[in-house]
């Protein structure tokens, strides 16, 4: 059986897109792992093995350095056939996994370089510099990934110029029946 590992250090373990739409769907056919950083411990739910690397760091910089490295080490220990990561700060571990010969999917939920330009907590002079720096780094890494999965057509168009294996899987709301099931699960 093939092993698939999803990685996030930002999203909650039961995130609708990651856990409910992707991991649970894949778990019908594959051995699925989800690496998270929430401090709630390891668990198994709906045939998805949840691996907790500990409580997420409070600062963005620490999260990008410390949590990324913890996630990378755990991902290597799992020795999966495919790695699917969901956070821009994990781009560097995606590259490291590729260098180890692993198949890697970057699931980009937002256009980070444009998003940075709207961050009110950043200095107005640093925003354009940081945006260009991040876009350059993300574009360079994107060339190396096996696939890029985008949440919108706009993001897909940006990455399609860099990596032909780019698709958009829009993050549409789930149906009422699925919403009821998820709400019921949260009450348990």
Image (spheres, rainbow, N blue to C red):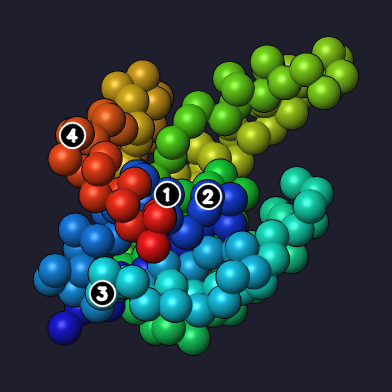
Q: Which residue is mark 1?
A: 15
**Nearer-N-terminus badge (1/3):** 1
Q: Which residue is mark 4?
A: 175
Q: Nearer the viewer, mark 2 or mark 4?
A: 4
**Nearer-N-terminus badge (4/1):** 1
Q: Real-space Cα distance between discs 1 and 2?
A: 6 Å
Residue at 61% over, 63% down: 38
Residue 13 on image: x %, y % = 47, 59
Decide if residue 118 is on the left or right side of residue 42.
right
Q: Residue furthest left?
A: 29
Residue 108 drawn above or below residue 184? above
Q: Which residue is mark 2?
A: 11
**Nearer-N-terminus badge (3/4):** 3
Q: Which residue is mark 3?
A: 47
Residue 186 makes an appearance in the image = yes
**Are the residues at dot 1 and dot 2 in contact (C-beta closer than 8 Å)?**
yes
């Amino acid at each position: 059986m093939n092993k698939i590992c999803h990685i996030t250090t930002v999203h909650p373990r039961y995130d609708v897109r990651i856990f409910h739409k992707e991991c649970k769907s894949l778990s019908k056919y594959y051995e699925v792992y989800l690496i998270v950083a929430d401090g709630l411990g390891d668990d198994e739910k709906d045939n998805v093995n949840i691996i907790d690397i500990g409580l997420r760091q409070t600062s963005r910089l620490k999260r990008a350095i410390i949590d990324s490295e913890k996630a990378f080490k755990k991902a290597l220990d799992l020795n999966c056939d495919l790695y699917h990561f969901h956070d821009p700060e994990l781009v560097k571990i995606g590259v490291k996994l590729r260098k180890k010969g692993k198949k890697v999917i970057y699931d980009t939920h937002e256009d980070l370089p444009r998003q940075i330009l709207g961050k009110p907590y950043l200095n107005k002079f640093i925003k354009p510099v940081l945006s260009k720096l991040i876009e350059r780094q993300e574009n360079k890494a994107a060339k190396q990934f096996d696939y890029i999965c985008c949440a919108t057509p706009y993001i897909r168009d940006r990455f399609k110029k860099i990596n032909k294996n780019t698709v958009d899987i829009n993050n549409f709301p789930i149906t009422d029946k699925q919403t009821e099931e998820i709400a019921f699960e949260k009450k348990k």
